[in-house]
Structure formats: structure tokens, C-alpha cells
Amino acid sequence: MKAIMGWLLVFLCFSGLLHAQGVFSGDSVVHLAVFEVSSERLDNYAAGQKMLTPDSLILTLNNTMNLGELAERYSSLQTKTYNFNGLSTISFRGTAAEHTGVYWNGLLLNPSGNGLIDFSLVPTGYFGDVHILYGGGSSLFGSGNIGGSIHLNTHPVFMKTIKAGAGMGFGSFGEYSGNAAITLAGNKLFSQTRAIHRTSCNDFEYLDIYGENQRQQHALSRQYGFIQDLYVRLGTKLLLGGAFWYQDNYRQIPPSLTQTTEDATQEDRSVRGMITARKFIGHHRIAFRGGLFHDESGYFDPGSSESSRIDSEIATDKINTELQFDTRISQYMDFSTGISFINEHGNSKNWNGKVFQNTTGIFAMIRVFMPSLNWKANLNFRQNFTGGYRVPFTPALGLEGHIWKPVSGKISISKNFRIPTFNERFWVPGGNEDLDPEESWNGEAGLECLLTNKQVTNKGVVTMTVFSSSVENRILWVPEGSYSVPENVKKVWSRGIEFTGMASFSFNGWQIKPDVGFTYVKSTHQTKLSPADDTYGKQLIYVPEHRFNANLTITFRGNTLLYGHVLTGKRYTTTDNSAYLPYYDVGNLTLSRDIDFGKHSFALRMEIRNVWEEEYQAVAFYPMPGRYYRISLNYYLN
């Protein structure tokens, strides 16, 4: 009987989608894009690749979440969470977490030390929109984009506006949160400030390895930060902008089920600033963006003795600059080219002091419209130059457009790469400065069916995508004596299929939006290191073959009900696939009430997470909480 009601809602969601297929009729028209001077390579030169953009309602209802929670519920991405409010990483289509690039207004956020973004430290409420691009993107963005990329953006709107808001929330396990935001805009100025604060004891109950009830210990977390965006429009031809983001996080590291005590703590701090400038000259545009990102992380474990004591501090700085030129060659062809420069340096006793790395990239992109076919195509090229490496040339080809009536198609193929991180090159002991970059070929093809009814505001979209990614020179830490050494030892092949379906119905003031998604991924080791290698052909650890998610959103006169359900298949915890974590499915419910008083409005929201009290582990020996609650009240001035 477990989770019967959850799966009933999933069934209703899917049934509504099937009904939409039967009701909707009419031809689908692919509207060709006009030439627009946009800062987003993502918008103009990613033809053929799957992209997901959560709508504004989803972002608003989940603005207290971190980015890892948002991705887990509303996408096919695999989220790996070590404990409640602990380290959270995201991977695409069976690739590794370090194959995911994260961009803030077009600049790479991934720190130079380990190359990983901890998504539990990225508040969703900071950003106006979130784009998730599946598949390889090295030709567009450079190193690390083998699996996919996540883009966090702010778009200024130059119209007279004064908006302000503040809120607070309370939840289970001693959670308290607060937030504030203010937007000031006019014809020439746009300013937006957002701030958050959150603390939680995370002292939930769980069953230990002996089946006895225990309460989570040493699990306090605290997070605060703010982000400031400022844009100035000088006439109609020049736009200047800047942004500043400060984030501070502290957490106690709770013990795993196999540990008796744990006293470790971790502190993370990020200071990020960037500037942008865009100059329009007829059908041409010159754009510059530059950023300075400082990340520091400190991990301290007193241990049981002096020899077991760990005190690790890593600080990295990244200067990231890019100059881009866009132009129109003809009525049906656009061209873009540019150069980027990244200076990375860091300091840690884990690396025996200071280290640095410089990377220069040259890129070019062509976009072609074929109006007679209702298709468009892009051809992208990039060559990076990094000291001490032979960095591969990375081309990409993508096409998309109309096939027949409501059906359109996409196809893309790309070469991609990832440069080793500072940890992989310089860690003491074990760092390997002779590593080669990881390289991959990525391909995908998809069909999309757009179903609309012109008489009423109903619509539906069904998509299916097949994909393949072959990664060579895969870097793994291999035991060598008393420690491990990173080596280019593996070839990994990930392939699979993704299905998504979304629909929207509006009638008599009601709006109903169901969506479903299913992913099958096979990600296997393709290199046999020895005759006795029992990892050959086996599924990578923590990559589920099957994953299903569904959401149902119902709104009526300021009231919103959102139910989401996620099923994650079994995940192997050993490279020979001899041990695994069983599948789990989790339901989450959000109830929201909006009350308007002219320019003033209030939003009361209640969340019930893990509704059916599923007992599960996302990572072995780290329990997750059962049912828990969160309630929040927000005030807005418009």
C-alpha cells in the first residue's frame, strides 16, 4: 500500500496528458527566429540539443529550495546527496558530476580545486530564470561540459518598477529561514537585490544498522548570502551591467551509519563579481563580460588522535574574461566569434602551496535558417590552449526544425573535453601533472510533438530523445601503495533514452499542468584493465538505469496545489555491481495561497516533503529524513 496515493496522482497526471493527445489537433508551425543581439549563446547556437527551462510558477513556488532539490524534482538529472542539507552534486545522462558546467550570466562558476559545484549551496530564489542544457557544450562554453550545463541568469527589464518583498519560514528539525528582495527599475536603470538566511539543526530520527531508532547528531547547518544586479542603459546602443554575489555557509558533518562519533565541520565562502558591456552597431554587436570569483573551503576533523587530525583549507581565484562579436552575414545566416581568457590560481597546503593555470580559447559559430524547410542549423568551433596540455579541437553540429504537421525534430553531434582540476594535478600525495584531458563524442536525436487546441488555451508537448556519450581518458583515482593516484585509465560509454510529456489546461479560472518524465541510462566501463577486471561492462556506481518523475500543478483564484513524485531506480555502490542501494520513491506536496490587497500581497505556503515517509538512502550509509514540514509567509509590494 506504500505510496498508493502518490502513484494515483501520477496516473492522473499521465492520463491527462494522454487525453490531451486525443483532443488537440491542428498544424504546428515552426516560427523562425529573427536576428536578435542576445548575450546568450544558449539561445542562438544550441540547435539540436535538449533544453529544459522551469517556468516562473515553479521557480516561485520553490524559491526556498536549493538548486539540487529543484533539479531532482523537475528534471531527469541525477542528484547525489550525501545527507540532508549535505553535499549535493548533479550529473547528466550517466556522466560524472565534474562533467556538469554551471554558469552565472555566461561565466563559469565551477571552482578550480575540484571542479564541482555543491548545489546545496546555490539558492534557487536568487535567479530570474534557470536553463538546463543537455549534452556536450564544449564548443560553446569550453572545458567540463561533457554531460551538460546549468545556466543561472538575470535579465534586466527597463520599465518603471518598484517591487519589494520579505518573508520568513519555519520547518521541521529546527529550521528557520528568512529572505528579502527589492527591485528598482526605470527607462535607463535596473537594480535588483536579493538576500537569504537559513539555519537548521537537521536532527531527524532514523533507523541505524541494527534497526533501532536514533536521532541525527552533529548536523547543524547555517547559510546566508546576497546577490546584487545593476544594469544601466545608455541610449539604445549601449548596455552596461554588473553583479556581486556573496555566499557564506557553515555545517557540521554528521556521522554515517558505520561511524560512532563525528566532529568534522566544513565552512565554504564565495565572493563573486562580474561586469558586462554590450555595444550595438546596426546588425552588429560587440559584447564583453568579465568576472573575478574567489572560493574557499575549510574542512576540519579533530580526529581521535594527532595522527588522524585533518585540517584542510583550499582557496582558489579565477579571472574570467570574454570578448565576442556578432553579425548578420545575410538574411538567413548569422555569425559569431570571440576570444576568452581564464586565469586560475589557488593556494593550499594540500598542494604544497600556490598553483596556477592559464587558458585561452578561440571560438566561432554560424547559424543558418532554411525557411523552405522550416529548419535551422548551427556549426560551432572552439580551440582552447592550456599550458602543458594538448587540448582537442571541439566542433559541434546541430539541426532542428519541422518534420510533419505537429512533429519537429532535433539532432546534434559534438566533440567535448575536460581539463584536469588542481586536485587531480597537484594533490599531495598522489597528484599527477602528466594527466591528459578527458575527451568525448556526444550525440543525440529527438522528436517533439506539439499539441494545441486553437479554440481554448490548452496545449501539450511530448518529446523523446535518444543519446550517446563516449568518454575517453576518463580520470579515476587508482590505488598505488598507501594512497591513490589519478590516471587516464578508463573509457566510459553512456547511452539511453529520455521521455517527457507536459500539458496545460485552462477553463473557468482553473489551470491544470501535469508533466511526466522517464529516463533510461546505461553507463558502463568499456576498458578492461586486466584479465581479472570485474568492472568491465558494469554500470557506473550511483547511476540508476531508471528514473521517473511526475508533477501536477493546479491553480484557482490564488490557490495552488503542487504534487511531485520521483522514483529513482537501484544504484550500484561497488564497481563490480555486487552491492547496491534499492530503488526509492518520494512524494512532495506544496499548498500555496496568494492574497492581494491592491499593491500589497501575501503568499502563505505549506510544504510536506516525503509525504509517504519513505525510508531511503541517496548515498550508502547516509540516511535521509522521513516526513517533514515547512511553512512560510511572504509579503510583496508591487
Image (cartoon, rainbow, N blue to C red):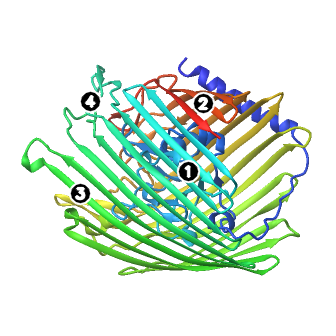
- N-term-proximal mark, 1 vs 3: 1
- Residue position marked by numbered label 1 in the rendering: 127
Looking at the image, the residue that sits furthest to the top is: 1
Is label 1 in contact with label 3 (beta carbons under 8 Å)?
no
- Residue position marked by numbered label 4 in the rendering: 217
- Residue position marked by numbered label 2 in the rendering: 603
- N-term-proximal mark, 4 vs 3: 4
Label 4: few (<14), some (14–19) or many (≥20) C-alpha neighbours in 10 Å: some
Q: Position of residue 630 (x, y in %)?
A: 48, 27
In this orientation, which residue lies closer to the viewer: 589 or 570? 589
Q: Amino acid at mark 4?
A: Gln
**SS type, badge 1:** loop
Is label 4 in contact with label 2 (beta carbons under 8 Å)?
no
Front of the two marks 2 and 1: 2
Front of the two marks 4 and 2: 2
Residue 539 visible? The answer is no
Q: How far apart in space, not on screen, are marks 4 and 3 (Cα)? A: 24 Å
Q: How far apart in space, not on screen, are marks 3 and 2 (Cα)? A: 41 Å
Label 3: few (<14), some (14–19) or many (≥20) C-alpha neighbours in 10 Å: some
- Residue position marked by numbered label 3 in the rendering: 313
The label number, if any, that marks residue 47 in the structure image = none
**SS type, badge 4:** loop
Front of the two marks 3 and 2: 2
Looking at the image, the residue that sits furthest to the left is: 306
Q: Amino acid at mark 1?
A: Phe
- N-term-proximal mark, 4 vs 2: 4
Q: Amino acid at mark 2?
A: Ala
The correct choice, above or below, for 95 with respect to 15 in the image is below
- N-term-proximal mark, 3 vs 2: 3
